[in-house]
Image (spheres, rainbow, N blue to C red):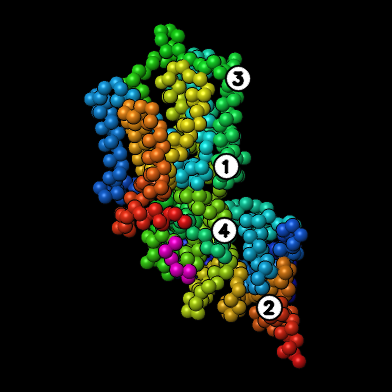
């Protein structure tokens, strides 16, 4: 009975299932030919914005440069959080751990071992990723609140370790990166230098998120977010996807932390392991629109500019008003500003009140 | 006449003494069967008979308490679901599991991107998805959100996702539940088409009539164990099957 062979005849199904095997070069060539103004405008707009920000630097005063530098930092952090928290659906409350680890790796290498910043920064990224994989393998087995709390704990733990490794890190007394004369392994960038550095970090994070979103890994991340059993049934190695997303996110955060350390020159564990960094990442992504490339960008730029504006103009009430605005935005746009406007555009329903009703179940 | 063991190709799926216990309850107990290449095996049984658990044990979504699952003669017991998918075993879920936030086309493309050992680029996967949507008959909804689909179309999407993994063995967990008469006929026709295309099918069903018309063999599960297995007509005439489904009082009343 079982002597029938597996060779299927040329049925309609066999033709559909046939795989077109092509080389990477063929795929790339086809992709380039498929580019049209209609499908390239987001990339061109992004490139235009990047160049405009470089040009803008010549026109603005140092104070505004400093403000925009902070905006760039948060764009990178929000994009990083969105990769694991938005696309993959694992809301991490411990991303600041990678920020602190990145910062301390650079500071220790530059201060203790006189390593140049450009050598220390990649090491910081690698150590951040190694730490992410190390805690990711056990923690990414948890879901929802459990994962959130576990990552929060991991970040607190990482801070305490740095705090108590006094011989290496200076412990609670802080650490200083030498920036003057022969002591400096790398000359300090100054305000204009850090403006450009953080602009590049932010642009790179947006580019990574954009490419990721339309990649096989990106689709796998969304599948894992929606239903892990269904994703696994379609051949997705869910553990690998989650750990990879966590690692990519950590790499961006650690890189930002590395630049931040050099910019600050002197800092304490409480500065670079400050939970408010994590909280801001989450809020920026949630308000902007999680699971989109534009969302974290809008959230980070909008909230950081708003926070700075309130700080300058409202004095001691700025935190109160900032918090109230966040609450209102979350109430009116629970799915995030970008997601609301995209859906509203597609369905032609712009009523904010209807939106509130839809999501208040 | 029995051929020597070595010259006979192993069955595409063989289940040996498979058991799974949840606490004190044996959901599946000592189940053994094998499916011939390009056959259609129907699995029936009343609610709670262990049908879905059996599927989950075969695809690695649950680990068996004891027993073995063999694909093409090699032991895959305890393998993770994605590894089993890469052995070209695909499945559907009883409760459809579409990925919200992706279009119907993208849902199917994910299977083509990750489902087998030779994965497609995103672009090729989307093209394959379009052809599969046409095959199952929901091409007109390619750009829609999966939660906008009707029950029948959602099941077709579930099937297209599984097919995108290029399966040789397809496990269908109640693909016909909740469908109307005409939709069932369309589904039956599609399943025949898949078999003719070289896919071996194991179909868990509640809808008796449909499963009888498509299956070569039927396995009846009752309280986790195999009640009987054989060709459809033989199984349906079995007194124990009638009892399991309709209750022994019904059988007694009829016989008096």
Quarter of the image for residue A183 reads: top left
Rendered residue at 36%/46% (across/down)? A337
Is tag 1's residue or tag 3's residue first in the polypeptide sequence? 1
Q: Can you see residue A111?
A: yes
Total marks in image: 4
| Magenta span includes B148 | yes
Q: Which mark is residue A84?
A: none
Residue pointed to by mark 2? B245
Q: Are marks 2 and 1 on the same chain?
A: no
The label shown at residue A165 is 3
Q: Nearer the viewer, mark 1 or mark 4?
A: 1
Q: Which of the pair A335/B4 is nearer the observer?
A: A335
Report whether B3 appears left or right of A268. right
Q: Which residue is mark 1?
A: A147
The local crowd at label 4, few if under 14, some if 14 to 19, many if 20 or more residues have their Cα within 10 Å, is many
- Say what secondary structure mark 2 lies in: helix
C-alpha gap between disc 4 and disc 2: 34 Å
Residue A11 in sight: no
Residue B48 against residue A361 in the figure, above or below: below
Which residue sits at x=41%, y=60%? B145
Task: Kindly indicate whether the residues beneath marks 1 and 3 are on one polypeptide chain.
Answer: yes
Tell me whether marks 4 and 2 sit on the same chain: yes
């Amino acid at each position: 009975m079982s002597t029938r062979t597996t060779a299927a005849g040329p049925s309609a199904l066999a033709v559909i299932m046939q795989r077109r095997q092509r080389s990477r070069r063929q795929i790339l060539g086809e992709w380039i030919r498929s580019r049209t103004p209609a499908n390239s405008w987001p990339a061109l707009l992004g490139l235009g914005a990047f160049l405009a920000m470089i040009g803008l630097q010549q026109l603005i005063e140092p104070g505004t440069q400093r403000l925009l530098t902070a905006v760039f930092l948060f764009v990178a952090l929000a994009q990083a959080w969105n990769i694991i928290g938005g696309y993959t659906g694992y809301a991490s409350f411990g991303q600041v751990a990678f920020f602190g680890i990145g910062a301390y790796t650079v500071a220790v290498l530059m201060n203790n071992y006189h390593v140049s910043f450009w050598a220390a920064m990649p090491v910081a990224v690698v150590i951040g990723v190694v730490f992410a994989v190390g805690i990711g393998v056990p923690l990414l087995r948890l879901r929802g609140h459990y994962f959130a709390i576990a990552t929060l704990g991991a970040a607190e733990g990482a801070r305490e370790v740095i705090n108590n490794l006094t011989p290496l890190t200076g412990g609670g007394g802080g650490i200083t990166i030498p920036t003057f004369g022969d002591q400096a392994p790398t000359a300090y960038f100054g305000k204009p230098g850090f403006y450009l550095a953080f602009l590049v970090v932010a642009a790179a994070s947006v580019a990574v998120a954009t490419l990721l979103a339309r990649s096989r890994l990106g689709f796998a991340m969304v599948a894992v977010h929606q239903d892990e059993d269904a994703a696994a049934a379609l051949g997705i190695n869910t553990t690998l996807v989650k750990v990879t997303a966590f690692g990519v996110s950590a790499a961006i955060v650690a890189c930002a932390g590395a630049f931040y350390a050099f910019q600050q020159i002197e800092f304490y564990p409480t500065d670079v392991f400050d939970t408010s960094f994590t909280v801001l990442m989450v809020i920026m992504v949630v308000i902007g629109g999680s699971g989109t490339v534009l969302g974290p960008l809008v959230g980070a730029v909008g909230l950081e500019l708003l926070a700075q504006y309130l700080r300058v103009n409202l004095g001691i009430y700025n935190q109160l008003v900032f918090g109230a605005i966040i609450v209102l935005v979350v109430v009116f746009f629970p799915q995030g500003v970008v997601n609301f406007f995209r859906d509203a555009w597609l369905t032609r329903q712009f009523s904010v009140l209807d939106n509130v009703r839809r999501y208040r179940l | 006449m029995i051929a020597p063991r070595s010259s006979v190709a192993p069955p595409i799926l063989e289940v040996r003494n498979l058991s799974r216990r949840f606490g004190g309850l044996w959901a599946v107990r000592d189940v053994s069967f094998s499916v011939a290449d390009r056959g259609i095996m129907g699995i029936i049984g009343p609610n709670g008979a262990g049908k879905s658990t059996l599927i989950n044990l075969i695809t690695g979504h649950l680990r068996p308490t004891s027993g073995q699952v063999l694909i093409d003669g090699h032991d895959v017991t305890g393998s993770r679901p994605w590894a089993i998918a890469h052995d070209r075993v695909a499945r559907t879920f009883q409760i459809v599991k579409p990925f919200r936030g992706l279009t119907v086309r993208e849902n199917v493309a994910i299977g083509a991107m990750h489902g087998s050992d030779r994965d497609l680029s995103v672009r090729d996967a989307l093209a394959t998805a379009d052809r599969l949507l046409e095959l199952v008959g929901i091409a007109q909804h390619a750009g829609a959100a999966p939660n906008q689909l009707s029950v029948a179309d959602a099941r077709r999407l579930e099937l297209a996702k599984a097919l995108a993994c290029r399966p040789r063995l397809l496990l269908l967990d109640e693909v016909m539940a909740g469908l109307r008469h005409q939709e069932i006929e369309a589904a039956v026709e599609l399943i025949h088409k898949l078999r003719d295309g070289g896919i071996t099918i194991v179909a868990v069903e509640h809808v008796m009539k449909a499963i009888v018309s498509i299956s070569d063999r039927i396995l009846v599960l009752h309280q986790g164990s195999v009640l009987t297995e054989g060709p459809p007509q033989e199984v349906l005439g079995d007194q124990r099957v009638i009892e399991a489904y309709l209750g022994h009082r019904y059988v007694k009343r009829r016989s008096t």
